Image: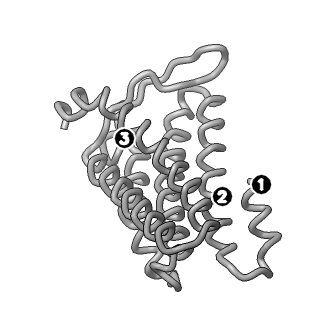
Amino acid sequence: VALAVYSWSRRRSPGNWRGMAAVALAAALWDVMAVVMATSSFEHARLALSAKYTMLGLSSVTTFLFIARHTGHWQRTRPLAAAAFLAIPVAGHLAAWRDGAGSLRDAVFSESYGLTYFVSLGYGPLYLLTTAFHYALIFVSLGFIAQYMRRGGATARGQGTALFMTILIPAIANVLVLGTGAAGWVGDL
């Protein structure tokens, strides 16, 4: 939220303040939905979990579009082109709002210390497609950042290194988490 407010305050400055605000807003909504899920009853936690994963899809796309524009790979993002990038994650995650239809299914919740969390989560037929799409965006973004760092000066290298690590570390952690559960969900598909 703070980054979105900061971006808004810089709206008269040259640069991609709208892209930064979109990234910040998508990430904030993702965080808000995680809190909503944790504080929901079991009946409402499934809906909040689906909303959280929908915001995850929005977050990866807005991050990719921001990086592509900031690094000079895509100077003007047209609304129709941005909408096309959203098609796969939106379809997969919105379909996940119903068990068995999209990326998620068979969510089982529990409670600990007054907070709701999911104990187990099955993956639906669109899970591999949406996950592959998100990782493709991540790796292309990392490539854009690496090129930006190589052709830029000291400021570009500093910004690029921070952004590169900010994207790479959670991606590696997520791959490790997914790898521990891969045997179960691959057999379910």
Type of amino acid under label 2: Ala
Question: Could you tell me residue 10's position as x and y percent?
Answer: 79, 73
Circle 1 sits on which residue?
2
Q: CA distance from mark 2 to mark 1?
A: 8 Å
- Three-letter code for the amino acid on which mark 1 is drawn: Ala
Chain-order first, disc 3 or disc 1? 1
Compared with 162, 121 (above or below) is: above
Residue at 63% across, 22% down: 115
Q: Secondary structure at mark 3?
A: strand
Quadrant holding the C terminus: top left
Query: In the visual, does 101 lie left or right of 156?
Result: left
Residue at the image position 24 percent from the left and 27 percent from the top: 184
Figure quadrant of residue 3: bottom right
Left or right: 184 in relation to 14? left
Judge depth for marks 3 and 2 and give the one in front: 2
The quadrant in which residue 23 appears is bottom right
| Foreground disc of the pair 3, 1 | 1
SS of the residue under disc 1: helix
Secondary-structure class at tag 2: helix
The image shows residue 119, relative to residue 179, as above or below, that is above
**Apparent side of residue 72 relative to residue 115 in the rendered image (left or right):** left
Distance between mark 3 and mark 2 Cα atoms: 25 Å
Q: Which residue is mark 2?
A: 24
The reply to whether dot 3 and dot 1 touch (C-beta < 8 Å) is no
User: Which residue is denoted by mark 3 in the rendering?
Assistant: 104
Tell me where residue 99 appears, x and y as whole percent: 36, 39
Above or below residue 20? Residue 93 is above
Report the front residue among 28 and 112: 28
